[in-house]
Image (spheres, rainbow, N blue to C red):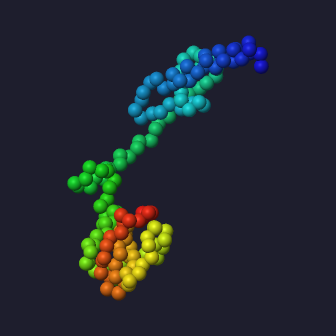
Amino acid sequence: MKPVTLVACALACAAIAPAVHAACSVTISTARCVSAFGQAPTGPATEEAGISARFVQAPERPERPERIVPGRSTRFFSTSAVPPPPPTYAPGDVLPDDVMILLNRERHGLPAPRDGWTYFRTGREVYRADLQTREVIDRVNDHMSIRF
């Protein structure tokens, strides 16, 4: 493409572009401006270019009620959706029957169980406890190489 043609095209585009960007200079609360370019251009340059626009009635948006939980500053937060944290156990406590044995101890860098104890997991907490009585010996989260 010749430089003269390129400059002529650039000038033609520059003449039309401000008219397109000057679209919808009139603000009407219940109408929006539409055109072939997405916005309504105005002015004599657009009439010469054959660009047309019109105002159409915009549908009213229903107002959304804000759901605020009393005592919280966060919107859209429900206390029923957040599960309570699992209880923590101290050495000497007995783990309930629903606490699962941790079977992939190698993945977490824990040594093999011995002397009748093994690892139990409840939530994100891992405990070393007696296998028969389920009495907690120690909490081992701080000694793991990979955490939950």
Question: Which residue is depicted at the point 41% across and 42% down?
Answer: 60
Q: Nearer the viewer, residue 54 or 92?
A: 92
Q: Is residue 96 visible?
A: no
Q: Residue at x 31, y 73 (%)?
A: 138
Count the marks: how many? Answer: 0
Classify residue 101 as left or right of residue 66.
Answer: right
State the image quarter where residue 11 is shown.
top right
Near-viewer residue (66 or 73)? 73
Quarter of the picture holding the C terminus: bottom left
Where 140 falls versus 6 (above or below)? Answer: below
Check the picture and name the quadrant holding the N terminus.
Answer: top right
Horizontal side of 73 relative to 64 (left or right) equals left
Please say if 80 is above or below 114: above
Residue 70 in the image, given as x and y percentages of width and height: 23, 55
Q: Is residue 110 above or below residue 78?
A: below
Location of residue 50 in the rendering, given as x and y in whole percent from the top left corner? 64, 22
As drawn, the residue found furthest toward the bottom would be 132
Residue 42 shows up from this direction: yes
Residue 59 placement, left or right of 6: left
Outermost residue, front direction?
115
- Which residue is pictured at 28% across the width and 73% down the height? 89
| Residue ID at (31%, 59%) | 78
Residue 4, percent from left and from top: 74, 12
The answer to which quarter of the image holds residue 110 is bottom left
- The residue closer to the viewer here, 67 or 111, is 111
